[in-house]
Amino acid sequence: MKKIKLLILFFSFITFSFYSKGQDSIRKGSWLSVDLHYGFILPLYTSSMNILIQGHVPAFEVDYINKPACTDNWLSAYHCPETGIAFFSAYLNNPAQLGNEYGIYPFINFHLKRSFHEGLYFRIGMGLAYMPVTYTRLDNHKNDVIGSHINAMFNFRLNYHFYLSDHTRLEAGLGLTHCSNGAFQTPNLGINLVTANTGITYSISSPEKCMKHDYPDTVKSKKIEHELFLVAGGSEIEPPGGERYPEVTVSYIGFRKLSRKSKLGLGVDVFYNQANIARLKVDSITLKNNLQDVQLGFKAAYEITLGNLSLPLEMGGYAYTKFTGNGSIYNRIGLRYYTHKHIIANVTLLTHFVKADFIEWGVGYKF
């Protein structure tokens, strides 16, 4: 239930963010922000994780923020969002078994409310995290959440800020930070931090008032766009140090554009994951042939469009699968970049609720 509530909260933030209306961004320029965080590790997985959680988590963050002028179509569509890069450092309050968490990630702050004196925004950030302390079979075998030093980092945050002057603003918010390696190396339960934050942001350039640029939303269409993807990844199964298996997915989505900001679609996934064959053997289940390892899933897809960049959010269910250890529902988040009229670069994370399965690398073709 905690997983379901977390997903509902996240998608509620997403929906509120992209359908709210307001004025255009008022101040443009470069800003430097310093934030203090305080929160806790979310125990979503097993009771053994509770042994690792020994107290609340303090964290520190420094952001470089750029507030552009609304001179592009997609910027105007989102009322001139802020973009930036963040350095994040957290003390996990268990130095022997968990250590610290360091991350760097680019982000976008989507405005929900803007004025000369206050603002509310929703942040989405994706980057890399470094964990100095990980699982080791002899010295740190109780750490069943992080198996590699390099991990993916995702940050979602609802933030409120209040301008003290043209150069200074105070802010406070609530966010979720997730770190895991996509099961590339086990163990890989991952760490979810829920934190409240407060800080100060200062303009390091001369803030200027943005001029308003209106671009008509002319891209809404009843035409269906077809996208076909071929992606591959790999995952390591338990116990830690086990063999790493390849995974290949062929995916199709039929999209209809809702506006210049988003599109909605339905699709189908065909998975072939050799790790599932090994998992079934553990339960004394042997497949007659490798084709029985194929998984078929149907999905709903929502894609947030940021110019040539897009943020896919997908939820699907398995219609056919021999391996049921991950449940019947899967999710996909990540990045897609439309490099050409037809070619799409794809980096996505396949998960089962908030448990990462593998990172998918590949290409797509739009027709």
Image: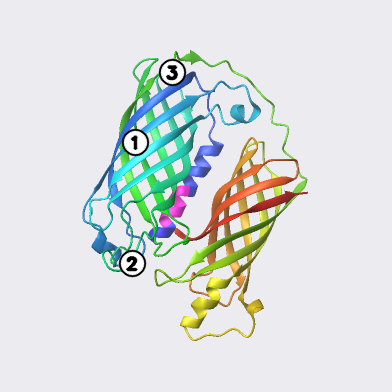
Q: Residues within 10 Å of mark 1 (few under 14, many from 20)?
A: some
Q: In terms of secondary structure, what is the magenta stretch mainly?
A: helix
Q: CA distance from mark 2 to mark 3?
A: 47 Å
138 vs 182, nearest the viewer: 138
Q: The N terminus appears in which quarter of the rendering?
A: bottom left
**Image mark count:** 3
Disc nearest the viewer among 2 and 3 = 2
Q: Secondary structure at mark 1?
A: strand
Mark 3, other Cα within 10 Å: few <14 / some 14–19 / many ≥20: some
The three-letter code of the residue at mark 2 reads Thr
Q: Please tell me the numbered disc located at residue 173.
A: none
> Which numbered disc flags the more N-terminal residue, 2 or 3?
2
Label 1 sits on residue: 61
Q: Residue 116 — which label? A: 3
Residue 170 appears at what percent x and percent y? 33, 25
Q: Amino acid at mark 3?
A: Phe
- Look at the image and give the residue range highlighted in magenta: 5-10
Residue at the disc numbered 2: 46
Q: As displayed, is residue 187 above or below residue 180?
A: below
Q: Residue at x 43, y 44 (%)?
A: 155
Question: In the picture provided, is 179 more to the left or to the right than 24?
Answer: left
Q: Earlier in the sequence, mark 2 or mark 1?
A: 2
Q: Residue at x 48, y 25 (%)?
A: 66
